[in-house]
Amino acid sequence: MLTLLKLLKDGRFHSGQALGGALGVSRSAVWKQLQLLEAELGLSIHKVRGRGYRLASPLTLLDSVAIAEHASSCNWPILVLDSIDSTNAEALRAIERGQTAPFLVLAERQTSGRGRRGRKWVSPFAENIYCSLVLRIEGGMRQLEGLSLVVGLAVMQALRVSGVSGAGLKWPNDVLVGQKKIAGILLELVGDPADVCHVVLGVGINVNMQMTEEVDQQWTSMRLESGQAFDRNRLVAQLGQMLQAYLSRHQVEGFSAIQAEWEQNHLWQGRAVSLIAGVNQIDGEVLGIDSQGALRLKVGGVEKIFSGGELSLRLRDDS
């Protein structure tokens, strides 16, 4: 099925006979594969008698060679998959298989993409970026302090360099444009964080997606913000270079050296918010973050510190 897709990706008409010849199957088999492409991948295929079949628009697929050409300074090994449950899950399996870090896992689609707090990450085929970078961490907890916030900064800067000037941060792991989510980060850890461990840095970016009924919150994409389609290979290369730069700085200088830059780009700095922790709600004003990436809130006139993976931050109605 995906071999057929690669024949159609140029967006031009191809006759059923030519496609069948290239695949070594009958025209009826080609027809069945076309139906599967539409049903399983949500692609729109135009069928015109006498001309053949073509995709509604050309498709550029992820390609490790093309990514490397755009990012000569970033030489992580790259695994590109057509379809996977989630890139984080595949990255964790690769660690179990003994694959040497660092390496990057990319997929054209995820069938079980995950966000924070177990939320589904909508992952249509060949429209967005779904990737996971695996790092081996030595040297204890200091190397993990504020790490998800550092990744958020790298993602935000990659978006800005690519033309989405309004991208900003929301504690702890979101990148927004205004009030709409455009990217998210999910970190997972394997091993002993006090000694030697692996960390999976999962990143999802809405790139060329223009519509979906599956997202349960306000969202946007690079294409919706700019009015143009983006080359995802070039974007992955830009993201890789930003990640490499920020992660290197974090490793050498620690998160405290990046703290002020993160706060300057926090869209909710000084805003009235509600912090949701399970069934509990804490109302306060965002003061910033501390040197380890924890949230600083003014609650009832007193500064309090909050951190943890199950916390969710929301703007208050009166903010």
Image (cartoon, rainbow, N blue to C red):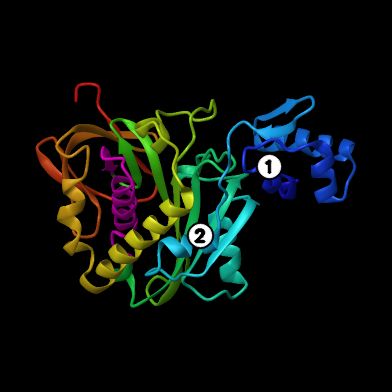
Residue at (84% x, 44% y) in the render: 20
Q: Which amino acid does the dot numbered 1 rest on?
A: Leu
On the image, numbered disc 1 is attached to which residue? 8
**What numbered label is drawn on residue 147?**
none
- Observer-nearest of 171 and 222: 222
Residue situated furthest front in the rendering: 50
Q: Position of residue 148 (x, y in %)?
A: 34, 55
Q: Would you say residue 148 sits in the magenta stretch? A: yes
Closest to the observer, 271 or 166: 166
Q: Earlier in the sequence, mark 1 or mark 2?
A: 1
Q: Quadrant of the N terminus?
A: top right
Q: How many marks?
A: 2
Residue underneath mark 2: 66
* Foreground of the two, 41 or 319: 41
Q: Amino acid at mark 2?
A: Ala
Q: Is residue 221 visible?
A: no
Few, some or many residues within 10 Å of mark 1 (<14, 14–19, 20+): many
Q: Which residues are magenta?
A: 144-170
Query: For the residue labelled by badge 1, is the local secondary structure a helix, a strand or a loop?
Result: helix
Q: Is residue 145 magenta?
A: yes
Q: In the image, is 237 to the left or to the right of 27?
A: left
67 sits to left or right of 268: right
Q: Residue at x 34, y 35 (%)?
A: 280
Report crowding for label 2: few under 14, some 14 to 19, many 20 or more residues within 10 A (C-alpha): some
